[in-house]
Amino acid sequence: MFESIDQVEQQLAEHDYITDRMLATSIFLAVNMQKPLFLEGEPGVGKTEVAKVIASLLDTELIRLQCYEGLDTQTALYEWNYPRQMLELRLQEARGAEKKEIGANIFSEEFLLKRPLLCAIQSERRQAPVLLIDEIDRSDEEFEAFLLEILSDFQITIPELGTIKAKQTPIVILTSNRTRELHDALKRRCLYHWIDYPSVERETRIVTTRVPDIRNELALQLCRFMQLIRQRDLFKLPGVAETLDWAEALLALGKDELDSETAEQTLGCILKYKADTDKIQGHEMSEMVKQAGLATISSSSETASVFSRRIE
């Protein structure tokens, strides 16, 4: 359990996750109130990473359920190991077991394949596990309705075994890229937080934290450029994940500053659709690189001026 919101911010930063006060507050409340935390936002803004970092700093298990269209309860919860059951029946027959004894044990836990939801409910670790239900918006409405029961009672019923109730409530993180709207009934069971694109200052901190060998000036220039590109009418705006990929790419190329030629050659690090790259290349690219560079120089000068006044 966290003792304060400040502690959440500090520990997340120690695990290289730079957050804002609102998200830190949501995490603090979700963990201490034992309420699921529902995170929405554009792809690449760090939703999934929240669950990974929480599991790491609490030193507990991360159990991930990746959602997709057609996901059913068996895949998410449990299923019987049919091949092993059939093998057990053949072995019992070969051993000459009586008819009434054959197959008497095949619906026991020994033959149960536990999927993420059941693993989270049955966890016996000292610290409750973190259950990440990733990209819930990709699943069907039927699975979403099934999930309501799990999040309400944290128990399931297996007809052959009975009701299994969680020994301790998992820390549940749900993420969504908002490809479809989810039912209000699901949201009511959760604390909600929208993770937006970070400010230039916070994104620069993220880049210098996750890519420590990059020069501060280049990191700031990249983040200024990303702010400009996110103002364009693109099919898919780049997230923080793309900023980090770009920073690592420029570092691998040995670049100390961003120029138009390099930006155009490495545009595939941040834009994933041809229509988007066509809009940015050429004169548009040059202007954005120029603006990002001028803004970086101005920002660096202001920082130096403030630092100078402090010394005086």
Image: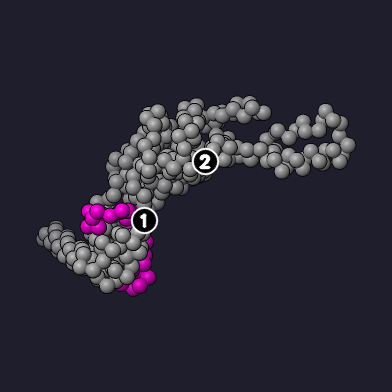
Decide: is 87 above or below 247: above
Write the residue at 35% across / 59% down: 273
Q: Where on the picture, by quarter, is residue 96?
A: top right
* Residue on which disc 2 sits: 71
Q: Where on the picture, by quarter, is residue 112?
A: top right
Q: Residues within 10 Å of mark 2 (few under 14, many from 20)?
A: some
Could you tell me residue 297's position as x and y percent?
17, 65
Q: Nearer the viewer, residue 80 or 30?
A: 80
Under tag 2, what secondary structure? loop
Q: Is residue 212 magenta?
A: no
Q: Nearer the viewer, residue 182 or 158?
A: 182
Distance (Cα) linking label 1 and label 2: 26 Å
**Region of the chain picked out in magenta, as a range:** 228-255
Q: Quadrant of the C terminus?
A: bottom left
Decide: is 161 above or below 202: above
Q: Is residue 131 left or right of residue 83?
A: left
Write the residue at 32% across / 41% down: 194
Q: Nearer the viewer, residue 176 or 3?
A: 176
* Residue on which disc 1 sits: 241
Could you tell me residue 16's position as x and y percent?
37, 53
Under tag 1, what secondary structure? helix
Q: Is residue 36 left or right of residue 261?
A: right
Colouring of the image: one colour
